[in-house]
Image (cartoon, rainbow, N blue to C red):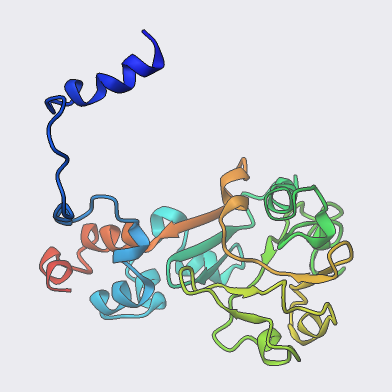
Amino acid sequence: MSDSNLHQNTSEDQGVPSGAPATTGTAPAPENVPGEGEHKSKTFTRRSVLAMAGCGVAGLVVGGVLASWGVTSKSIASGRIEIRTTPTKMIVTDRARCSGCQRCEMACTLKNDGRVCQHIARVRVWDNYNFGSGVDTNDGIFGNCQFTVASCKQCADPQCAKYCPVHAIHSDEETGARVVDEDVCIGCGMCSAACPWNMPHINAQTGTSTKCISCGRCAEQCPNGAIKFIDWEDIAQKAIDEGVVSTATIVEA
């Protein structure tokens, strides 16, 4: 069948008689079906889940809500687990699972910069690969072979944004991550100098700062699950399962 015949028969295949006058006006918008076509982060955010639970993140840890992801009071106290939160995700890094392969660094730059260039990666393993955060920590390949996965803390009061002379760092409306506007950034390096962990790095090729945008690519590519991006909806469901939050509270919220 030719393309012309195919187009002519389209209206007949859809039950519209040929030659029928075209309908005018705008079709009524479909009603929103709860949960259909909505992203998890649109409904459940850090603020709403913590409000429903009636406690902070520490309360979720003590209550055992996060235990299935390896987040317990003991694992945090030992330094094995580190957690950070954004309005849409909880980010968990597990030193016991990190093998030091640095695949996260390669995946990060490949997605965000179009090339593998680990020295500007937004997530870092190589910095602490040999001796950990210091020769006295007994970490790294020359110690106990435990590696630290370092990335932006997404601070509530980010010093990188505070000291940027051109105000190129702002909070992303959708994810809440502190991101760099490359059209504004002048590559002066003040953000890196101001950050207590020196997380932002200057990309010599573009002349702009690179910084974590919480895209989750590192977690997707980690072969051992050392990095996890957890939706707040999943945390809310676990809070229900553990009896911390009731389904009635979820419905009312």
67 on left or right of 233: right
84 on left or right of 88: right
- Quadrant for the N terminus, please: top left
Position of 122 relative to 161 (above/below): above
Q: Dividing the picture into quarters, in which one does residue 210 lie?
A: bottom right
Q: Residue at x 60, y 81 (%)?
A: 170
- Quadrant for the C terminus, please: bottom left
Q: Residue at x 84, y 64 (%)?
A: 206
Q: Position of residue 24 (x, y in %)?
A: 16, 50
Position of 53 relative to 233 (above/below): below
| Res. 210 visible in picture | yes
Name of the residue lying farthest toward the top = 1
| Res. 65 visible in picture | no
Q: Dividing the picture into quarters, in which one does residue 125 lie?
A: bottom right
Q: Residue at x 58, y 89 (%)?
A: 157
205 on left or right of 252: right
Position of 22 relative to 233 (above/below): above
> Which one is nearer the viewer's eye here, 117 or 37?
37
Q: Position of residue 196 (x, y in %)?
A: 74, 83
> Which one is nearer the viewer's eye here, 100 or 80?
100
Q: Position of residue 208 (x, y in %)?
A: 80, 71
Q: Position of residue 187 (x, y in %)?
A: 83, 77
